[in-house]
Image (spheres, helix red, strand yellow):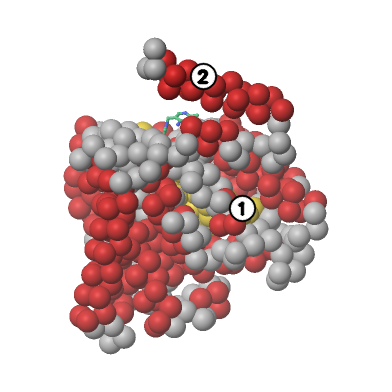
């Protein structure tokens, strides 16, 4: 019932409008607007795998031929398979914790594949699909979850910052980084740089996100805010975060906001490319709300059956991001059983390699904890490292007496 959606009266609408109270039905409709896709959802591929033409966004995916779509499909299958393997390895005690991305493959692969090498991505902790798209070796991610490492990749080389667990904090880092791109004259044409920052629906309630929005807005920073609205912040539903669809928040800060079907890889690719292009030309920032669903638990320490009904999950299974691409490819005749079987076999092999590596994962040397803290050498940190290493040496020699 989007037409019944209640919106706050605009100033100047007169006393009657200002004092207007929403009916209970209107309040419910308003709440639903925060938790359902709604008419304003940008979608290029329906859950049934039908291609919807879009006058505004088709040009951003004009190069996506059958081969490229197959690659996007393959990316999503591989990432999901790796995610399921990691989840299982946590259950077997090989990882301390795992943060599943199940259901969010299209949001992550679509946006991740929209980036250029020169761009920088700031993830939270669930962005394994973006990491993969940025060329990060997924084995390096697993060290974090085995609790042996912080982040084992070269974040400059990959344009993919370390994971951030503190909710919303990376938004400030990203705003600063994007302001730097602006100050250094790296925006202004097609070759310009941009930054993308990932965060969740729950993070939008954090002060850091508000501050990041303000700084990026007033400095026209080339920053794409990519909010994956998976509708849950652990056990808190989106209705407890906002009274209006999250993408509409952008208006209050003075930059564009758009809601995309986060389970539609093609739409996520198109909308992110558009947003990045705006940023490269100095028209940033842009907020993208990717409307999706967390199909598994928040982490392996969480039990969602305590706070949500399973019929919600059943409904979202019908909107599966991988199945719709499969249906589209199969219908068009571009992919047969041979292709799908081959991708599955590749995914199984990928998972087997991750498992093999995890079971035999080398522990990084203790001094690794001091690496990549500052860009320049720090005498204070050097002294701490020496002290820590001689402390550890004490254990080695203690056994000799
Ligand atoms: C500052 C801060 N407060 C609380 C937490 C605990 N916490 C971890 S995840 C989470 C929910 C985040 O939800 P959302 O932003 O929607 O992201 P999602 O996990 O759904 O991807 C919370 C509250 C935290 N990590 N940092
Ligand atoms: Mg969430």
Instruction: Please rate how many residues cluster around mark 2, counting C-alpha atoms within 10 Å: few if below 14, some from 14 to 19, many from 20.
Output: few
**Mark 1 against mark 2, which lies toward the viewer?**
2
In the displayed structure, would residue 326 be above or below residue 347?
below
In the displayed structure, would residue 120 be above or below residue 209?
below
User: What residue is drawn where x is 69% and y is 50%?
Assistant: 178
Instruction: Please rate how many residues cluster around mark 1, counting C-alpha atoms within 10 Å: few if below 14, some from 14 to 19, many from 20.
Output: few
User: What residue is drawn where x is 68% and y is 55%?
Assistant: 222
Q: CA distance from mark 1 to mark 2?
A: 32 Å
- Cβ at disc 2 under 8 Å from ligand 1: no
Q: Which mark is residue 156?
A: 1
- Residue at mark 2: 391
Left or right, residue 355 beside residue 29: left
The residue positioned farthest toward the front in the image shown: 401
Quarter of the view holding residue 91: top left
In the displayed structure, would residue 164 be above or below residue 344?
above
Marker count (numbered) = 2
The residue positioned farthest toward the bottom in the image shown: 333
User: What residue is drawn where x is 49% and y is 61%?
Assistant: 135
């Amino acid at each position: 019932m989007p037409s019944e959606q209640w919106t706050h009266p605009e100033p100047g609408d007169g006393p009657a409008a200002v004092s207007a109270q929403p009916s209970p039905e209107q309040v419910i409709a308003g709440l639903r607007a925060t938790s359902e896709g709604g008419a304003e959802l940008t979608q290029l591929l329906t859950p049934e795998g039908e291609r919807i033409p879009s006058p505004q966004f088709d040009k951003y995916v004009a190069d996506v031929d059958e081969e490229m779509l197959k690659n996007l499909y393959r990316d999503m299958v591989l990432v999901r398979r790796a995610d399921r393997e990691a989840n299982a390895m946590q259950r077997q005690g090989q990882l301390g914790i795992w943060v599943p991305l199940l259901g969010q493959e299209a949001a992550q692969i679509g946006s991740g594949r929209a980036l250029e090498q020169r761009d920088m991505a700031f993830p939270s902790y669930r962005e394994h699909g973006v990491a993969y798209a940025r060329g990060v070796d997924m084995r390096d991610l697993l060290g974090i979850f085995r609790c042996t490492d912080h982040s084992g990749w070269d974040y400059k080389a990959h344009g993919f910052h370390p994971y951030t667990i503190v909710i919303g904090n990376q938004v400030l880092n990203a705003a600063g980084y994007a302001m730097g791109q602006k100050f250094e004259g790296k925006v202004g044409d097609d070759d310009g740089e941009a930054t993308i920052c990932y965060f969740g629906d729950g993070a939008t309630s954090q002060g850091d996100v508000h501050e990041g929005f303000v700084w990026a807005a007033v400095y026209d920073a080339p920053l794409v805010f990519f909010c994956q609205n998976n509708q849950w912040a652990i056990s808190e539903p989106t209705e407890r975060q906002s009274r209006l669809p999250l993408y509409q928040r952008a208006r209050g800060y003075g930059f564009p906001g758009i809601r995309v079907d986060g389970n539609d890889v093609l739409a996520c690719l198109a909308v992110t490319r558009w947003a990045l292009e705006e940023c490269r030309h100095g028209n940033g920032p842009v907020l993208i709300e990717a409307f999706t669903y967390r199909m598994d638990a928040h982490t392996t320490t969480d039990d969602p059956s305590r706070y949500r009904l399973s019929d919600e999950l059943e409904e979202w299974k019908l909107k599966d991001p991988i199945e719709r691409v499969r249906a589209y490819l199969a219908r068009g005749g571009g992919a047969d059983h041979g292709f799908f079987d081959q991708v599955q076999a590749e995914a199984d092999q990928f998972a087997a390699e991750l498992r093999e590596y995890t079971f035999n994962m080398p522990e990084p040397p203790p001094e690794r904890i001091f690496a990549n803290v500052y860009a320049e050498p720090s005498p204070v940190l050097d002294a701490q490292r020496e002290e820590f290493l001689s402390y550890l040496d004490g254990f080695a020699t203690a056994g000799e007496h």
